[in-house]
Amino acid sequence: GAGVSQTPSNKVTEKGKYVELRCDPISGHTALYWYRQSLGQGPEFLIYFQGTGAADDSGLPNDRFFAVRPEGSVSTLKIQRTERGDSAVYLCASSQGQMNTEAFFGQGTRLTVV
Amino acid sequence: KQEVTQIPAALSVPEGENLVLNCSFTDSAIYNLQWFRQDPGKGLTSLLLIQSSQREQTSGRLNASLDKSSGRSTLYIAASQPGDSATYLCAVNTGNQFYFGTGTSLTVIP
């Protein structure tokens, strides 16, 4: 596609519910990143995929968060038993996969847990 | 752990002025540094990418410099316009992830 696409753009969920956030990277990009951004802060790293595998998941805050990329393209970030503190904008980025290539971000999914 | 700092946190200038945004990082072991623009409620738009071996990159009215050994980068915006108003973020790439600063919020007054 023309750019990184994230769906939904907004998600409101009740505390304790399960949510899935989707990211469609730029076609051909092997590297995919998930970030979380709170108001007034810079994005914080969650997880990095190279192809189908999670090369670095050190940013996932706890075991309620999980992400998959089964075919090396689309990725889904899954959050179980959501808490109000999970409310943030979740950003996805992709790059061609080399260490020195440019990263492109999607528009983000604004998650609100009520 | 890599830490990225951006100064100033906010900046307000009259239209037409040239300005400089600063970014510093604590660990010089980076692959590249990228500058982004973020409009309110939006995602990040890539402005410039500087490889670790480069000293500067230019795109239109934007010029970014990198001094890896001292852990500093600057983004120079020439002849600022109201449409430049946004938050500017720098990010350093350490291989598996990008570390971001908290950004500089720029307002260009017509």
Image (cartoon, coloured by chain):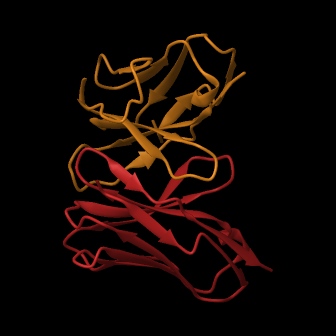
Chain colours: A orange, B red
Q: Nearer the viewer, residue B19 or A37?
A: A37
Percent x, y for residue A57?
Answer: 30, 31
The residue depicted at 68 percent of the width and 46 percent of the height is: B41
Task: Say how many tags the image has.
Answer: 0
* Direction from residue A110 to residue A91 in the image, left or right: left
Identify whether A2 is placed above or below A82.
below
Identify whether A66 is placed above or below A37.
above
- Asked if residue A26 shows in the view, the reply is no
Q: Which residue sits furthest right?
A: B110
Percent x, y for residue A75?
Answer: 40, 24
Q: Which residue sits furthest bottom?
A: B17
* Direction from residue A67 to residue A72 in the image, left or right: left
Percent x, y for residue A89?
Answer: 59, 37
- Asked if residue B35 shows in the view, the reply is yes
Q: Nearer the viewer, residue A3 or A92?
A: A92
The residue depicted at 30 percent of the width and 66 percent of the height is: B26
Q: Quadrant of the C terminus of chain B?
A: bottom right
The residue depicted at 65 percent of the width and 89 percent of the height is: B17
Instruction: Say which quarter of the image contains residue A64.
Output: top left
Percent x, y for residue B93?
Answer: 29, 55
Instruction: Say which quarter of the image contains residue A52.
Output: top left
Q: Nearer the viewer, residue A46 or A23?
A: A46
* Direction from residue A51 to residue B9 in the image, left or right: right
* Direction from residue B76 to residue A83 in the image, left or right: right
Identify whether B24 is placed above or below B95.
below
Identify whether A7 is placed above or below B20.
above
